[in-house]
Amino acid sequence: MIQIYNCIDRLDLYQWNKLTETSSNTSFFQTKECYDFYASLSFMEPFVFAVSENNILKGVVVGYIQKDGGRLKQFFSRRAIVPGGALLANDISEEALKSLLLFCKKELASKAIYIEFRNYNDYSLFRPVFESVGFDYKAHLNFHVNCVSEDVVKKNLGNSRKRDIRTSLRDGAEIVGDPTLQEVETYYGILSGLYRTRVKTPLFPFEFFSKLYKEHFCKFLLIRLKGEIIGGTVCVILKKRVMYEWFACGLDGKFKNIYPSTLATWSGIKYATDHGIPLFDMMGAGKPDEGYGVRDFKAKFGGKLVEHGRFLCVIQPLLFHIGKLGVKLLKARK
């Protein structure tokens, strides 16, 4: 018997935790801890759906509704994001997965223009089921860095990255593993500037980072030079299995022989290696058919280029195309 759940209170938490331990496509973003973090934020509208077969949990979908700007812009930018992709049992039936995905579409139809599963694992076995219920596969790249040992990390690291790390540390930059909240706020200012001038997409408000700062599963690794924060990385950890680089930035080009963005990402890779976390996930490297400077930057850390893609379901096509055009126009104006 297949049963669908749309309320956190009805889920068997023991089974949820067990599924995160046994599924081959587990990610931090599909855990109860992540859902609870989303739910703690005043601006976030999280959701969780699940499916069981014969009273055994087989699939969980954790995500949030995201909107941008004022009332009009929010109306045209409403989307349901599922970071990491669905948490699925290796033996979930096609019928159960279909039921879960169709329920997602039904429940989110009035709240979002589209649903996007951003996969951090290989979902190729499940792709036909997603496509059968209206999800299109979109190619998207990522890098996975092998952190099983220091020797492996150093062997794979590009020579230019080694040089930049060495000169940055030699000339006074330092990695701060226990920053103050005030330093995190300074870092947020740098990150906000990057999103405003280069990324040109909205960044979560500071509340997101101030609350994340207090969580045991998160690690802020900031870069300091002469007492000032000049960059850093924000990572979350899945039970000593994977470390995810959620945000990273630095004031590159402002200081001679100092490469804060390189040192920031390196600090995350080093932390994973030193703490027995075998995989460092760089959380995205763009579309394969488009030039992407960030991909070139990430490639030199020696990670494996993977394509796990995304599953996109447009619920309201007209609003989707209007919103897409609007985003392009806004980016062009900035």
Image: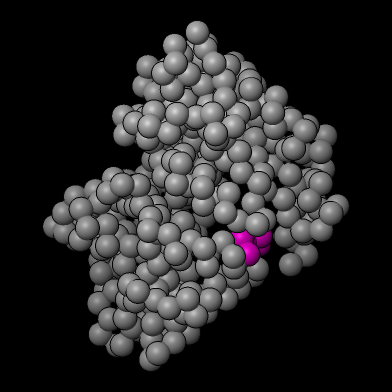
**Looking at the figure, which quarter contains the C terminus?**
bottom right
Q: Position of residue 107 (x, y in %)?
A: 69, 28
Q: Give the side of residue 223 with respect to residue 169, left or right.
A: right
The residue closer to the viewer here, 229 or 258, is 229
Q: Main secondary structure of the magenta part?
A: loop
Q: Position of residue 176 (x, y in %)?
A: 34, 76
Q: Is residue 246 magenta?
A: no
Q: Is residue 247 visible?
A: no
Quadrant in which residue 297 is drawn: bottom left
Judged from this view, the residue extending furthest toward the right is 72
Q: Position of residue 88 (x, y in %)?
A: 43, 26
Residue drawn at x 57%, y 76% as measured from the top left: 189
Q: Is residue 257 visible?
A: yes
Q: Say above or below: 61 vs 286.
A: above
Residue drawn at x 82%, y 43% as measured from the top left: 322
Q: Position of residue 59 (x, y in %)?
A: 47, 25
Q: Say above or below: 137 vs 201.
A: above
Magenta stretch, residue numbers: 199-205
Residue drawn at x 81%, y 58% as measured from the top left: 70
Q: Give the side of residue 116 with respect to residue 297, left or right.
A: right
